[in-house]
Image: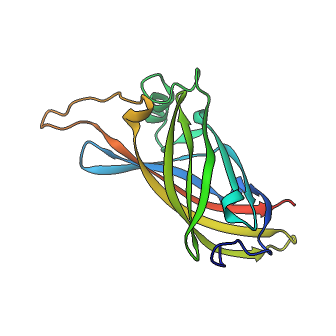
Amino acid sequence: MTTGATASQDLAGDYQLDPAHTSIGFVARHAMVTKVRGTFDEFEGQVHIDPDISKSVVRVVIKAASIDTRNEMRDTHLRSNDFLAMEEYPEITFDSTEVGLADEDTARITGDLTIRGVTKSVTFEITYTGSAKDPFGNLRLGFEGSFVINRKDWGVSWNAPLEAGGMLVSEKVTVEFDVSAIKVT
């Protein structure tokens, strides 16, 4: 991601997401007047960066029960069958199917996003934010990005009408991530 059509040889390799320094979250409009933000606190992910960027691979597995919006009653509702149905579908997964470059510091990734047992293809861009050796000698890479989905496409259709018109929860949800990945090989 910093050298045109191929990844820098220095960055090629296998990486693990560092959960202590990575954020995977979402934003949805609530009552048509404000945005509610949430995060997933338990996840794991692997990234393989190949010198031929098209051979790179991304896989992320999120524990649905780890959803946190800072409101326990709302979190319990989001874990229920109305939304994530986490008892039947405990994981949200993403598996890349295509990786390419949008520009020198931005990759375009297409992959299969599975929520509630429904798999749909999504495409988004991630921006390379840099690399550094941490105090423990680990090579870390940073990436950030976001994309918008319609939750109904994954069977997440619960809603409630508002007295003044409109619905309680927006259909569109923005997925946001800020990633620190540690090189393992």
Q: Residue at x 56, y 26 (%)?
A: 86
Looking at the rendering, in which quadrant would you find the C terminus?
bottom right
Q: Nearer the viewer, residue 158 or 113?
A: 113
Residue 3 seen by the camera: yes
Q: Nearer the viewer, residue 3 or 150?
A: 3
Residue at 72 percent of width and 61 percent of height: 181
Q: Residue at x 14, y 33 (%)?
A: 163
Q: Is residue 31 above or below residue 9?
A: above
Q: Quadrant of the N terminus?
A: bottom right
Image location of residue 54, percent across then percent down: 66, 60
- State the image coordinates of residue 69 (x, y, percent, origin top left): 48, 44
Camera sees residue 17:
no
Please tell me whether residue 166 is drawn above or below residue 159 in the rendered image.
Answer: below
In the image shown, does 50 or 88 lie closer to the viewer? Answer: 50
Tag count in the figure? 0
Q: Is residue 172 left or right of residue 95?
A: left
The residue furthest left is: 164
> On the picture, is 77 further left or further right than 144?
left
Q: Where is 47 relative to 29, above or below?
A: below
Q: Quadrant of residue 8?
A: bottom right
Image quadrant assignment for residue 172:
top left
Instruction: Indicate the quadrant where residue 21 lies.
Output: bottom right
User: Percent x, y for residue 141?
Assistant: 71, 68
Q: Tell which of 133 and 111 is nearer to you.
A: 111
